[in-house]
Image (cartoon, rainbow, N blue to C red):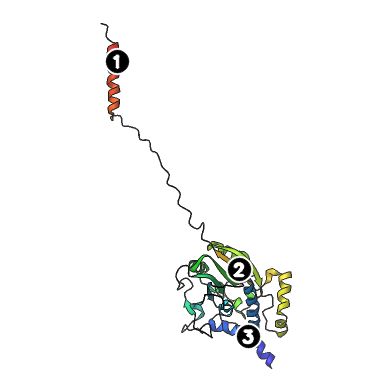
Amino acid sequence: MVRTSYIHVMGAEVHFTACGLQGFYETPLGAVTRRILRSRLRQVWPELAGREVMGLGHAGPYLRLWRRGAARLVLAAPEALAPGDRRMAPWPPDGPCATTLAEEDRLPFADMSFDNILMVHGLEAAENARRMLREVWRVLRPEGRLLAVVPNRRSVWAHLERTPFGHGQPYSRGQLTRLLERSMFTVERREVALFIPPFGLRPLLRGARMWETVGQAVAPQLGGVTIIEARKVVMGLIPPAAPARVRRIKVPAPGWAVTDEAKVRLVRSRNAGGMAGRTD
């Protein structure tokens, strides 16, 4: 009876809201997903000591990885995740609230406010991905880093709505790379994760580590998500001003304009001609 109820819950569609996402991470499959992704994110950014970090999207389950060392941690959630009364659970749950609701193309932060930005459940749900990335670029400091977790178009996860990764716009690795490069980022690192099938069966969940190891070795293109790190590009964005070129314009003297020196030469020429023409 317990098993039947459990399968029924996991078979339902996950609503792409803050409550729906939180509900997914409270299930056994969500807990395994969180553990796998936290491990991979920690490998990419082992330490962020003294850095100012923002989480964008539903990044709360992962942002606390750097809570001890970071100088500041802020969670910005798109308003689409909080429909209706637009309320969200405070984050972190055991400290002063550092959560804000924000429009994806109007983040409430000044230019160059953060050193690192973690984006989870953000890019695939964006109404305009280019505008969202432009805002991310704006609030990042020069050489700042973006780390995004995005559903992989080729994976089973992207085609089943029972997990958050089955909602919104999935991306192939090539599409994601081109999108970031067109948004003034340079891709530094690409990885894949979540090779475990997106089903809440306990035998599968117990073998999650084996699924990750085998999947990385045998079929890396089928991972459920792409983890991509990109660096903000500043140099070369605005080409330096070219030195002013001096243009020499030759203006011919008008026929009626005769200088004083030319007048003197003309008089001397006439005088010389007159002397040559005399016979006496």
Q: Which residue of the protein is positioned furthest toward the bottom in this rendering? A: 1
Q: Which one is earlier in the sequence, the residue at label 3 or at label 1?
A: 3
Secondary structure under tag 1 reads helix
Q: Is residue 157 visible?
A: yes
Q: Position of residue 244 (x, y in %)?
A: 42, 46
Report the front residue among 129 and 76: 76
In the picture, the quarter occupied by the C terminus is top left
Q: Residue 86, how many percent across, how many down?
A: 47, 82
Query: Label 2 neighbourhood size at 10 Å, few (<14), some (14-19), many (20+)?
Result: many
Cα distance between the residues tagged 3 and 1: 115 Å
- In the rendered structure, the answer to whether residue 227 lies left or right of residue 98 reads right
Labels 2 & 1 near each other (Cβ < 8 A): no
Which residue: 68% across, 71% down? 222
Q: To which residue does mark 3 refer?
A: 27
Q: Pick whichever, 61 or 4, lies toward us.
A: 61
What amino acid is found at the position of numbered circle 2 in the picture?
Answer: Ile
Q: Between disc 2 and disc 1, whose residue precedes?
A: 2
Residue at mark 2: 228
